[in-house]
Amino acid sequence: MDLDLLDDLLARSGEPSFRAAQVWEWTARGAGSYDQMTNLPVALRELLQRELPLSSLAVEREARARDGTEKALFSTGDGRPVEAVLMRYRDGRRSLCLSSQSGCPLTCTFCATGQMRFGRNLTASEILDQALHFRRVEAVDHAVFMGMGEPLLNLDAVLEACERLPAIGVTHRRTAISTVGWIPGIERMTREGPPLRLALSLHAADEALRSELMPVNDRYPLPDVLDACRDWAAARHQRVFVEYLMLDGVNDRYEQALALAHVLEPHATFKVNLIPHNPTDSDLRGSTRAATDAFKTVLEEHGVPATVRLTRGREIDAACGQLAARA
């Protein structure tokens, strides 16, 4: 819900300030209506029902994949599209993929979100309402800001939302923010905010190729980005996760694995997640499993820990890089 509007409504109605905490506690626990908030006076529940929607987002469409992944398409009050995903894993984890913007202004060539029209930054309430939508379905325990948008371009709202995620069931240590390498945001996360995890969308160790895939590299070159990540890791005493999308014939050769191992010094600071490419409207194709395994072996032989990420929700366009607010 819009927490600012909640505070304003309670103040105008002469309600004591602790009522806001009561409403939030019920909401964070997955309440689906004001009627469930039994420690609120009936008159107040009726007022809230009339004056304040339980969510600042309207659900437009939902889809579920065979692997249990669920995707929801929302619209904001001013009609902006937003998508979020719930990923279910066999070990019991329930992980949210949250969006920080409607669309994205950074136009990475491999990402469907980057090819759609950019709308605007989301408010902290709009970010939280993505999480609360799935919390009403079941308990959740992890979150990643890897949905629509560059989180560090909307860091005030992202951090405000992250401060409330533990009440929903997602601790700071289980919350990751993914960035293309927006250095001012990385520097700010080094100095302030809760102990969140940091993930860097890298995808090429070669400067020219990275700029081709990710135009933001012209503004913030990879060596400078990695220096900012090292500073963050030293200050936060955490490892940086590196996201590397495996693209057939583009960035998956032996010498490119060597180059990646070379730039990720010291190796204890980084861990690489190799990401299978998920189909979008681009002409790019994913690497074969053999090429991905060979790339992983080279990294590990040179001291860089690496894993191959599981793909979730590909059939409903809910996997990494596929969110584009379409059927």
Image (cartoon, helix red, strand yellow):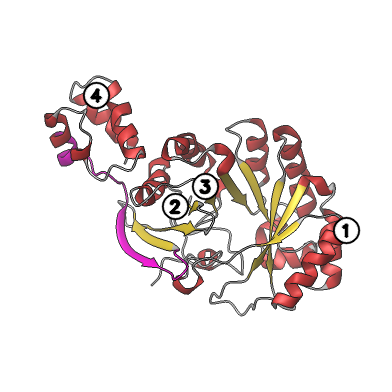
Q: Position of residue 277 (x, y in %)?
A: 62, 71
Q: Secondary structure at mark 2?
A: loop
Q: Earlier in the sequence, mark 4 or mark 1?
A: 4
Tell me the kind of residue under disc 2: Arg
Q: Position of residue 163 (x, y in %)?
A: 48, 34
Nearest-to-viewer mark from 2 and 4? 4
Residue bearing the label numbered 3: 142
For the question of whether residue 303 can be seen, the reply is: yes
Magenta region: 47-68
Q: Quadrant of the N terminus?
A: top left
Relative horizontal placement of residue 174, taking residue 289 as reference (left or right):
left
Tell me the kind of residue under disc 1: His
The numbered dot on residue 302 is: 1
Nearest-to-viewer mark from 3 and 4? 3
Nearest-to-viewer mark from 4 and 1? 1
Is residue 211 covered in magenta?
A: no
The numbered dot on residue 11 is: 4
Instruction: Name the residue at 56% across, 52% down.
Output: 150
Instruction: Name the residue at 24% across, 19% down.
Output: 16
Is residue 52 covered in magenta?
A: yes
Residue bearing the label numbered 2: 120
Above or below for 158 versus 93:
above
Relative horizontal placement of residue 217, taking residue 299 as reference (left or right):
left
- Give neighbour class at mark 3: few <14, some 14-19, many 20+ (Cα, 10 Å): many
Tell me the kind of residue under disc 3: His
